[in-house]
Amino acid sequence: MLASPGMQTLAAAIDTAAAQIEAQVIAWRRDLHQHPELGNREFRTASIVAEHLRALGFDEVKTGVAHTGVVGLLKGGRPGGVVALRADMDGLPVTEEVELPFASKARAVWNGEEVGVMHACGHDCHVAILMGVASILAGLREQIPGSVKFIFQPAEEMPPEGEEGGAALMIKEGVLENPTPSAIFGLHVTSRQSAGVIGYRPGPTMASSDKLKITVRGKQTHGAAPWLGVDPIVTSAQIVLGLQTIVSRTLDLNREPAVVTIGAIKGGVRENIIPDTVEMRGTIRSFDEGMRDAIHERVTQLAEGISAASRASCQVCITKNYPVTRNDPVLTEQMVPTLTRVASTGPRPMGIEVVPKATGAEDFSFFQRLIPGLFFFVGVTPPEIAPSQAYSNHSPRFVVDERGLEVGVRALAHLAVDYLAQRQS
């Protein structure tokens, strides 16, 4: 991959530039962390990104894509293909509990409720990393064999209710067109690995994610005379227990794992009234689209069957959110040498590992349905803390060891350049 002297020189220049810009990447990250914004409302973040790309002399900078997304095109000085790099920009409705000089104090309204806002998933890191990659590749553009499309995406954590957003809307608005990249790379910082460790796996990597809502309808009556009504609470309890058998007793788990979880139940207003209705909400996760559809069918059959046997009725509503995040096996095998080189070099070499499947979900998966993609992980847990003991992403106490950012910058920059170089060979 680095056989030619020109590519070796370019690789060395990327590493040198990454070391020089590390402090700036950390500064960007801290500023973004202190000023998080929720999905489809990333106005300040998008403005910072767009101004940065324009200052670097990008050939094209589009704003307002999928509400607040920014897309920049950097054309290299040598002819070649097109590759895309993606970073998500949105924070979460989480109130930060970490004592940092740049801790978020932001508040916002999310789905009608006032909430704290925090970059509890590390998207501040992703934006800062990709801004760093933009600086490096813009400075080396005359040596780049092709073009790099930079995608700064809003609303990965889902848009507000009633709005479209995220990768799906960016695709609808043409982000993968004019020009069309032949591959896309993205990363996610994670507390499950020590700072600087790179994790990847070919094939299914992160689960599909679906919303589940079950409404059970009975007949309201006095709690002292349950025989005069139909109890939707008891029926719902039977449904919850029955749902546990879908994964444990009806799916071939030698094939892929799956999860069916009920996370919220609402029904009734006082202790001596059996209510008319109970509402349950949950999530369904799987790693295979066929299993995904089978789970949906069995959830519906089970809930309706138990309700009918209890003289109640029910309505099952399942909304597909994100597909399986599936790393293209050929692309992954092609680019693992690049990730291995990045992980084993640099100022703090930490190594690379094949990671287990993650039941979290990612809307990077929408890009992967259209073009080959590789989504990988960079650890941000301090080496003195066991990753199993670290606060997870989405926790109000999620902490980032910023030594992992430089690894992310080098990884994305090298992946883009190496991929374009291989397209020429």
Image (cartoon, helix red, strand yellow):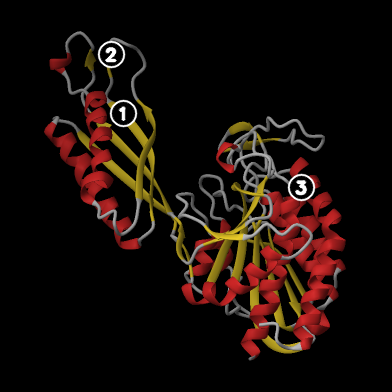
First-in-chain label (2 vs 1): 2
First-in-chain label (3 vs 1): 3
Q: Is residue 383 above or below residue 327?
A: above
* Mark number, residue 278: 1
Task: Give percent across and percent down for residue 421.
Answer: 68, 84
- Give the number of the mark in front: 3 or 1: 3
Query: Hey, what amino acid is under mark 1?
Result: Val
* Mark number, residue 32: 3
Query: Hey, what amino acid is under mark 2?
Result: Ile
Q: Is residue 54 above or below residue 116?
A: below
Q: Name the image quarter holding the C terminus.
A: bottom right
| Circle 3 crowding by C-alpha within 10 Å: few under 14, some 14–19, many from 20 | many
* Mark number, residue 30: none
- Give the number of the mark in front: 3 or 2: 3
Gap in Å between the C-alphas at discs 3 and 2?
50 Å
* Mark number, residue 273: 2
Figure quadrant of residue 121? top right
Q: Is residue 351 above or below residue 309?
A: below
Q: Residue at x 58, y 40 (%)?
A: 392
